[in-house]
Image (cartoon, rainbow, N blue to C red):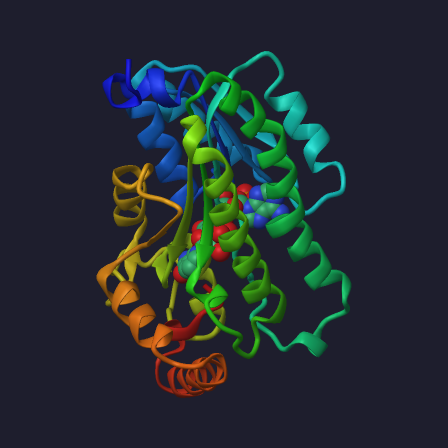
């Protein structure tokens, strides 16, 4: 039987593990997995939000849930993830946690802050890929989705650790795809442009671009979490990389036509201009 003949649950179940599931894209992705019949392990720092989501998911879909608080920037993160997933078969792993709430120059903070970001965005997803990809490859099915960012396409100010970590995630996913896709495991680097998430809204509010992060007015010209999840699921087997949204797909074409040095200059220019005129256009996204 070919992979295309399997149902979603047979191919990617029975459990999905979502790191960064308490809100935004990760929460939507977890919901979408449950709607397709997968049980879900939900990871993030805020237990209340995870419990609320888990209860809603159970009520809507009847799947099993585990809601486990873990700081993915902590050195004990992997131990907690192993505890959280004990005894269950992970057929789908999505690593979503990753935004930079600071958006500041490299020297503005003590080095521990970018190091913690690198731990959360690079080391922990690498440990998780190593842990969960092996059994998937043996079973000959499964999926790993690593959420990356346009910030990883070229260097830009105020995103030293963040942009570098997102480039790391992109290349890690691409290389894993190269190693695993013949074994039946889908690997996808899911590259996002600016996306309307609670984290983005909190950042815009801190910068004075939004009055209230819970303001229901849509932010114009950016992707929504629902669009991201829809494109991710539709393209699970179209890896190694999927850029989300027409706008990002077009602007990445322009970027690819430039030399690396020109691309950095373009990022600097966009960052300066956009930051002055429209702070949401160059969030550390
Ligand atoms: N929003 C954008 O404009 C944008 C653009 C491009 C790429 N992206 C990427 O999209 C992904 C999601 O971004 P986002 O805007 O939703 O913000 P985010 O801050 O990455 O939040 C997403 C989830 O991650 C969890 N999380 C964050 N830090 C964590 C930690 N140390 N330990 C455990 N969980 C943690 C958050 O929950 P808790 O606070 O409960 O822990 C939340 O559930 C990120 O990878 C980001 O790089 C976003």
> Along the line of sight, which residue is nearer the eye, 113 or 190?
190
Quadrant of the rendering where the N terminus is positioned: top left
Give coordinates of residue 252: x percent, y percent: 33, 69
| Relative to 175, residue 114 above or below | below
Residue 161: quadrant of the picture: bottom right
Q: Residue at x 46, y 54 (%)?
A: 148
Give coordinates of residue 241: x percent, y percent: 38, 51
> Along the line of sight, which residue is nearer the eye, 237 or 75?
237
| Relative to 115, residue 62 above or below | above
Give coordinates of residue 175: x percent, y percent: 52, 47
Residue 201 visible in the current orientation: no
Give coordinates of residue 53: x percent, y percent: 42, 30
Residue 38 visible in the current orientation: yes
Quadrant of the rendering where the C terminus is positioned: bottom left
Q: Is residue 75 left or right of residue 278?
A: right
Residue 272: quadrant of the picture: bottom left
Q: Is residue 159 left or right of residue 207?
A: right
> Along the line of sight, which residue is nearer the eye, 98 or 214?
98
> Along the line of sight, which residue is nearer the eye, 180 or 78?
180
Q: Residue at x 58, y 36 (%)?
A: 129
Q: Is residue 256 left or right of residue 1?
A: right
Q: Residue at x 40, y 19 (%)?
A: 13
| Relative to 129, residue 202 above or below | below
Q: Residue at x 60, y 40 (%)?
A: 45
Residue 75: quadrant of the picture: top right
């Amino acid at each position: 039987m070919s992979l295309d003949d399997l149902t979603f649950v047979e191919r990617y179940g029975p459990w999905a593990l979502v790191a960064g599931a308490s809100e935004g894209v990760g929460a939507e992705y977890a919901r979408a997995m449950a709607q397709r019949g997968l049980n879900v392990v939900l990871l993030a720092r805020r237990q209340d939000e995870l419990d609320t989501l888990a209860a809603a998911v159970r009520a809507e879909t009847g799947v099993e849930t585990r809601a486990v608080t873990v700081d993915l920037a902590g050195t004990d993160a992997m131990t907690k993830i192993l505890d959280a997933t004990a005894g269950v078969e992970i057929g789908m792993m999505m690593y979503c946690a990753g935004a930079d709430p600071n958006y500041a120059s490299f020297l503005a903070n003590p080095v521990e802050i970018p190091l913690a970001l690198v731990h959360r965005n690079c080391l922990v997803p690498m440990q998780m890929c190593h842990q969960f990809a092996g059994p998937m490859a043996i079973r000959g099915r499964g999926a790993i989705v690593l959420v990356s960012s346009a910030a990883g396409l070229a260097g830009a100010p105020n995103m030293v650790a963040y942009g570098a970590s997102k480039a790391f995630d992109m290349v890690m996913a691409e290389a894993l795809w190269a190693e695993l896709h013949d074994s039946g495991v889908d690997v996808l680097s899911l590259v996002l442009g600016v996306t309307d998430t609670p984290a983005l809204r909190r950042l815009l509010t801190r910068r004075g671009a939004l009055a209230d992060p819970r303001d229901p007015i849509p932010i114009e010209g950016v992707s929504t979490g629902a669009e991201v999840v829809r494109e991710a699921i539709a393209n699970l087997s179209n890896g190694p990389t999927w850029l989300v949204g027409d706008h990002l797909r077009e602007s990445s074409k322009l970027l690819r036509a430039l030399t690396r040095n020109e691309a950095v200059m373009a990022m600097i220019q966009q960052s300066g201009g956009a930051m002055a005129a429209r702070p949401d256009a160059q969030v550390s996204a």
